[in-house]
Image (spheres, rainbow, N blue to C red):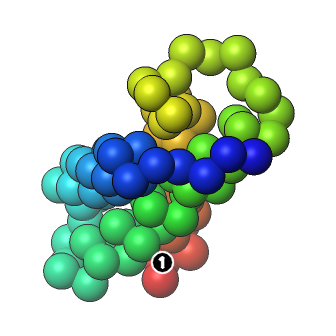
C-alpha cells in the first residue's frame, strides 16, 4: 500500500469535509452532530481509501485518491453514527 502524498491527503480531507457538511445540512440538528459527522466521514474515507488500495480497485481515481470508494465508506460511517444516535 502506497502512502498518500500531501496533496492527496488534503484532497481526501476536503472531500470528507464536504460530504460531512452536506450530511449535516441534510440530517444534522446540532453543532455536536457536525463534529461527529466530520469525524465519521474522515475515518470512513480513510477506510474506503485503504480498502480500495488493498483490493486494487479498478475504479478510476483522482490522482491517488479513490473518490468513489472513499465517499461510499464515508457516507456509510455517517449513517452508522446517525443510526446509533451518538
**Left or right: residue 29 compared with residue 63:** left
Q: Position of residue 75 (x, y in %)?
A: 48, 48
Q: Position of residue 77 (x, y in %)?
A: 55, 59
Residue furthest toward the right?
A: 55
Q: Residues within 10 Å of mark 1 (few under 14, many from 20)?
A: few
Q: Position of residue 64 (x, y in %)?
A: 51, 34
**Left or right: residue 79 compared with residue 57:** left
In-front residue for pair 2/16? 2
- Give the tally of numbered discs: 1
For residue 72, above or below residue 22: above
Name the residue at 56% across, 56% down: 46
Name the residue at 47% across, 67% down: 40
**Left or right: residue 16 compared with residue 45:** left
Q: Quadrant of residue 52?
A: top right
In-front residue for pair 84/58? 58
For residue 43, above or below residue 53: below
Name the residue at 51% across, 23% down: 61
- Can residue 19 be seen here? The reply is no
Q: Secondary structure at mark 1?
A: loop
Q: Which residue is mark 1?
A: 85
- Can residue 4 be seen here? The reply is yes
Name the residue at 19% across, 79% down: 30
Q: Quadrant of residue 31?
A: bottom left
Q: Quadrant of residue 36?
A: bottom left
Amino acid at each position: 500500500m502506497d502512502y498518500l502524498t500531501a496533496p492527496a491527503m488534503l484532497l481526501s480531507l476536503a472531500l470528507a469535509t464536504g460530504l460531512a457538511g452536506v450530511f449535516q445540512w441534510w440530517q444534522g440538528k446540532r453543532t455536536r452532530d457536525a463534529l461527529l459527522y466530520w469525524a465519521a466521514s474522515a475515518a470512513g474515507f480513510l477506510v474506503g481509501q485503504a480498502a480500495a488500495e488493498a483490493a486494487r480497485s479498478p475504479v478510476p481515481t483522482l490522482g491517488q485518491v479513490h473518490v468513489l470508494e472513499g465517499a461510499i465508506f464515508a457516507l456509510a460511517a455517517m449513517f452508522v453514527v446517525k443510526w446509533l444516535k451518538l
